[in-house]
Image: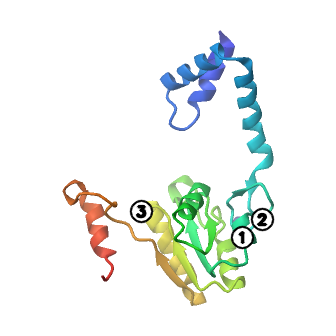
Amino acid sequence: MDSLNELINAFSSLPAIGKKSATRLAYFILKSDRAIAEKLAHDLLLVKDTIKKCSICGTYTEADVCHICSSINREKVICVVEQSQDVEMIESTGEYMGYFHVLGGVLSPLNGIGPKELKLDRLVDRVKNENIIEVIIATNPTLEGDTTALYISKLMESYGTKVSRIASGMPVGGDMEYIDKQTLSRSLKGRTAL
Ligand SMILES: [Zn+2]
């Protein structure tokens, strides 16, 4: 059954879907109503056709400029994140009232991703032209995320803009007994006054 194998291969090319899950999904489609397959095919193409990247911050949006960049009431702060999903996560906390900048990745010389690929000049332009008072770097606490944060902070040095990095450390409700040494070490370094 070539077409079924094609579908299994297509599903297994998705992130976090292994061969077993892909096979289960393909058989589910096979035995369910045609309407489900039609809706799925339609929705897949719809997001590709209607959603694009915001021309200012790079997050996904249905408009040319996203609703956050369109807002004039936000603080003159830019939070730099790796991907569009991070914007939604930070927005959902209700703790942040500034703008965003989505890098679409992190610096990774081994994979050929340098400052040019991340379009860091666009971030610099925004900081210069939008009177930004602070850049908060919220890349992931990985080696590449840290390298990217450091690179951006160096880039901002000549503009006199305050640069900060989000704190990382113990999870809320966590137990010190189960925290790895690196996380604990970061928690100590990033401590705040009470
Ligand atoms: Zn935007």
Residue 177's quadrant in the figure?
Answer: bottom left
Judge depth for marks 3 and 1 and give the one in front. 1
Q: From the viewer's perspective, is 81 left or right of 69?
A: left
Tell me which residue sits at (65%, 20%) in the image: 6
Tell me which residue sits at (51%, 78%) in the image: 153
Q: Is mark 1 within 8 Å of ligand 1?
A: yes
The crowding category of the residue bearing disc 2, from other C-alpha atoms within 10 Å (few below 14, some 14 to 19, many at least 20), is some
Q: Earlier in the sequence, mark 2 or mark 3?
A: 2
| Type of amino acid under label 2 | Val
| Residue marked by disc 2 | 65
Separation of disc 1 and disc 2 at Cα? 6 Å
User: Residue 38's spot in the image, x, y percent?
Assistant: 76, 26
Evaluate whether residue 190 shows in this view: yes
Evaluate whether residue 105 shows in this view: no
Q: How many marks?
A: 3
User: Residue 68's spot in the image, x, y percent?
Assistant: 69, 68
